[in-house]
Image: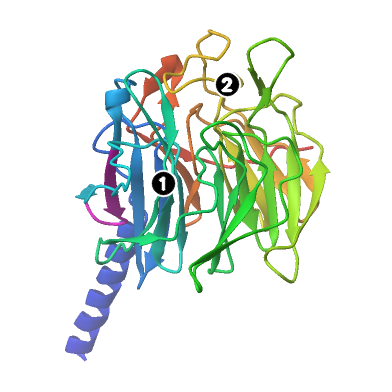
Amino acid sequence: MENITMLLKSLSYLSLLTAAASSIAIPDLPEPVSSNSIASTTVRGKTYIISAMGMGPGKQAADFHNKVWMHTLGEFGWTELPQVPSQQRLTGRAAASAVALNNNFFLFAGYTLAADGTKQTATDSYRLDPITRRYTRINDMPVPVDEAVALPYQNRYIYLASGWSDHGNVNLMQLFDNFTQGWSQATPFPGKPVFGLAGGIIGNTLLLCDGVAIEYPAHKPRNFVNEPACWQGTIGSKPNEINWQQVPHPTGKARYRMAATGVKVQGEEAIVFVGGSHTAHNHQGVGFNGQPAEPDSEVWVYSVTRQQWLNAQKSTAVMDLRTLLDVNGELYTLGGMISGQQVTNKPIKHQIELLPD
């Protein structure tokens, strides 16, 4: 009986340790980084989080990198993985798209910056196994894009929505099938083609908001213009079929480079948006209008269940984001820029608190 009692106590203690480990906050990234690509996946009970590529605190062309860090939830610190390969020999990428699917991470495109300011969209994409830590090149997307939104569906498909492709924005919904390793085109995005948009998916419903469109005035240089618009897509019986409808914008004022995800909020299926900036800007945080950009603290919550926006408490202001991580029901951003265009290495927890209507 005494042995059984001791065994039960030991098991109870181990359970407490496991619970404590799972609630440990995400540690600071090894280095400040902005426009990095982040994702998380759980394999055999272990949750892995990555931060891939992006731009360091110097905010110059030489600060773009291909570094990848991985953290295992409940363990100490970050592990540096082999750098993301590049068929074009790009020394670094920012604004790539990352998503977790079928126990792997997928990294799509992004862009690099030359010393003379020339921007180039990457053409190659990779699957990263968090266990073996090896990259496998996947088939190139039909139209390489950066500053797009990557959305997983049915643990098989990945949508890449809109984005920039070397010379301009595209309205494409490019669809990757992880079973066949093939690409196809889904029903195009019906809004203005944009880059730096944000979006999430829950069930068969996705929502894409904002970003920057391009205007071409007669006899004048092109203009980069904020696009305050939200489009809801419902995926049909075939993944290539999306029924689109525009939904009212929550504020009428667009944000650039927000982070978003689909998640349950107080039992309701919702798409949550955090961070970003009202000022469209370059990689250094300077607006295309010449004014410094500052991060926003508003939280937008769109209830898919009710088909309406819900009021939410503000959160920590941060911009130059890619994805909002859902880690054990808690939402985080990693890196980005905080006030004063400062590149940060901090994980920021965004507590979603709904307010009365």
Against 332, residue 255 (above or below) is: above
Depicted 72 relative to depicted 259: above or below:
below
Please state the horizontal and vertical placement of residue 19, each as a whole percent of the image. Answer: 35, 62
**In the figure, is residue 226 to the left or right of 46?**
right
Question: In which quadrant of the rendered view does residue 183 lie?
Answer: bottom right
Q: Which amino acid does the dot numbered 2 rest on? A: Ala
Mark 2 or 1 closer to N-term? 1
Q: Secondary structure at mark 1?
A: strand
Q: Amino acid at mark 1?
A: Ile
Q: Residue at x 61, y 29 (%)?
A: 298
Identity of the residue drawn at 36% across and 53% down:
49
Q: Position of residue 277 (x, y in %)?
A: 57, 24
Residue 29 versus residue 353: which sits nearer the camera? 29
Specify whether residue 349 is painted magenta: no
Measured from the top left, where is residue 284 in percent x and y?
41, 19
Q: Is residue 20 above or below residue 356?
A: below
